Image (cartoon, rainbow, N blue to C red):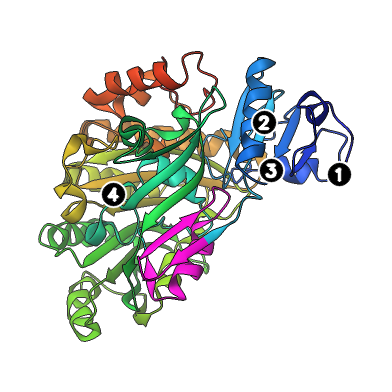
């Protein structure tokens, strides 16, 4: 590692390491999940704890540096890394402490959901986490966070008990319902706009095996399968969480997949609850039965393999209307890449029963989040894949409702960021003015002070 100026200017070395372009490990450290982005920070501060984060934030502010913050590095638009400036890399911060009696877990921001699940499942516990096991806990939590347990236990932010947050002024503040409650409100959905969280505390729930799996139908039946799926989800109980996916199987066959999961404790009841999803068409594949929660959590990992090239659009939907289904099915059939997918995840149930303004995740009444995810490998195919996705997105506009999930925004401009927050945007702006008036933390889906 080269001896760059950061530790000396701070008056002493970080407990972690500091890399520049000449340092061993620099190229590996600057890599992020989305292979579309090949950016080169001036410095990478690989933090070992909260003190390192404070030191790096102070250095960035005092030297007017562009700041990128990396947790799991899973940002769709590559906001975990910057050109020039400083990347504050939290990935070495992997501490996890489970308190099984209190049913709580405290974890640092470099932890991935699969890592957290392995620790909590050792005690038969879990909290709502992402649908991709290698997603970082930090980014997913700060944006709201939906996952397999959300219809039963609410969003990730609904299970967040407290945070420790380093502000733009370099202060470490504890945020909870009792302490700095307005900051706590904003951290639960406002993204990385209000500082760098160095510790997350979550409420845990008993979680044994689930009954679920993957059911696949031919893409030619996508319209009828998705219409049947919409009808089933209108009356689904809290214990049923599903995901509908347009994808290409490993054997190269375009398909519509239904991933159902019954989250109650009675596996026999789970088999009955899942059975209707197995009768929506002519099945070409079924792998359904009792399975560990960690297996369910990683079931969609192959749709988001790290370092491929990704481009996306996403939005909330009030319903899967026949028009929307037609656009998605016909559009996916024309996808130039077998690595692309359309992912439809339902909300409702416990998510919808939390008051709208209790967190900075506003769209509690959304029925679905729909994502078109373009994925490919060869840079020469960028134009074809981006063009295809934009065309489907344009055709879909008449069928979309207000609002978008902030974690599934690409680089789409200030108006789309506002659409992620609706009428609470002004309250978030006021919070931003309090804790980051100069917009030090601006490399994000930015709430401008």
Can residue 156 be seen at all in this image of the molecule? no
Name which of mark 2 and mark 4 comes first in the sequence: 2
Is residue 88 or residue 214 the one in the foreground? 88
Q: Does the magenta segment cover residue 7?
A: no
Q: Position of residue 305 (x, y in %)?
A: 57, 55
- Is 83 above or below relative to 288? above
Mark 3 neighbour class, 10 Å CA radius: few under 14, some 14 to 19, many 20 or more: some
Q: CA distance from mark 4 to mark 3?
A: 31 Å
Q: Secondary structure at mark 3?
A: loop
Instruction: Between label 2 and label 1, give the one nearer the viewer.
Output: 2
Instruction: Between label 3 and label 2, give the one nearer the viewer.
Output: 2
Q: CA distance from mark 2 to mark 1?
A: 22 Å
Q: Image quadrant for the N terminus? A: top right
Q: CA distance from mark 1 to mark 3?
A: 14 Å
Q: Position of residue 244 (x, y in %)?
A: 31, 58
Instruction: Between label 2 and label 4, give the one nearer the viewer.
Output: 2
- Is 428 above or below relative to 198? above
- According to the image, label 3 marks what residue? 31
Residue 351 as seen in the image, left or right of residue 118: left
Name which of mark 4 and mark 1 comes first in the sequence: 1
Is residue 214 or residue 249 the one in the foreground? 214
- According to the image, label 4 marks what residue? 158
Q: Secondary structure at mark 2?
A: helix
Name which of mark 1 and mark 3 comes first in the sequence: 1
List the single residue furthest toward the bottom. 268
Q: Which label is found at residue 55?
A: 2
Residue 318 as seen in the image, left or right of residue 204: left
Do residues under tags 3 and 2 come within 8 Å of each other at their CB atoms? no
Which residue is located at x 65 percent, y 14 percent? 64
Q: Position of residue 130 (x, y in %)?
A: 41, 55
Q: CA distance from mark 2 to mark 4?
A: 31 Å
- According to the image, label 1 marks what residue? 24
């Amino acid at each position: 590692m080269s001896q760059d100026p950061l530790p000396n200017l701070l008056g002493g070395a970080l407990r972690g390491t500091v890399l520049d372009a000449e340092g061993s490990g620099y190229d590996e450290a600057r890599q992020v999940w989305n292979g579309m982005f090949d950016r080169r920070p001036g410095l990478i501060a690989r933090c070992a704890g909260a003190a390192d984060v404070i030191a790096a934030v102070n250095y960035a502010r005092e030297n007017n540096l562009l700041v990128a913050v990396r947790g799991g590095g899973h940002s769709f638009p590559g906001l975990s890394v910057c050109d020039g400036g400083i990347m504050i890399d939290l990935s070495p911060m992997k501490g996890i402490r489970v308190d099984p009696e209190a049913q709580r877990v405290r974890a640092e921001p470099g932890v991935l959901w699969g890592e957290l699940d392995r620790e909590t499942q050792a005690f038969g516990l879990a909290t709502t986490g992402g649908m991709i096991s290698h997603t970082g806990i930090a980014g997913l939590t700060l944006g709201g966070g939906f996952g397999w347990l959300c219809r039963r236990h609410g969003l990730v932010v609904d299970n967040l008990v407290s945070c420790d947050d380093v502000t733009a002024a370099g202060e470490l503040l504890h945020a909870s319902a009792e302490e700095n409650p307005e900051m706590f409100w904003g951290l639960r959905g406002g993204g990385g706009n209000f500082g760098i969280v160095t510790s997350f505390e979550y409420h845990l729930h008993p979680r044994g095996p689930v009954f679920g799996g993957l059911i696949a139908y031919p893409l030619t039946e996508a319209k009828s399968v998705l219409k049947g799926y919409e009808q089933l989800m209108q009356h689904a109980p809290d214990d049923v969480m599903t995901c509908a996916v347009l994808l290409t199987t490993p054997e190269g066959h375009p398909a519509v997949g239904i991933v159902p999961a019954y989250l109650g404790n009675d596996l026999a009841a789970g088999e009955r609850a899942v059975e209707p999803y197995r009768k929506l068409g002519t099945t070409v594949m079924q792998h359904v039965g009792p399975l560990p929660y960690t297996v369910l959590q990683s079931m969609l990992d192959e749709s988001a393999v790290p370092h491929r090239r990704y481009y996306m659009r996403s939005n909330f939907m009030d319903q899967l209307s026949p028009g929307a289904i037609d656009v998605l099915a016909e559009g996916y059939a024309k996808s130039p890449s077998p690595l692309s997918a359309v992912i439809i995840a339902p909300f409702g149930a416990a998510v919808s029963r939390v008051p709208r303004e209790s967190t900075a995740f506003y769209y509690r009444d959304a029925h679905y989040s729909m994502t078109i995810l373009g994925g490919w490998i060869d840079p020469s195919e960028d134009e074809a894949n981006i063009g295809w996705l934009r065309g489907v997105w344009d055709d879909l506009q008449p069928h979309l409702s207000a609002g978008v999930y902030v974690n599934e925004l690409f680089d789409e401009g200030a108006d789309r960021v506002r659409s992620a927050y609706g009428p609470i945007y002004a309250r978030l702006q006021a919070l931003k003015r309090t804790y980051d008036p100069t917009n030090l933390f601006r490399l994000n889906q930015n709430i401008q002070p």
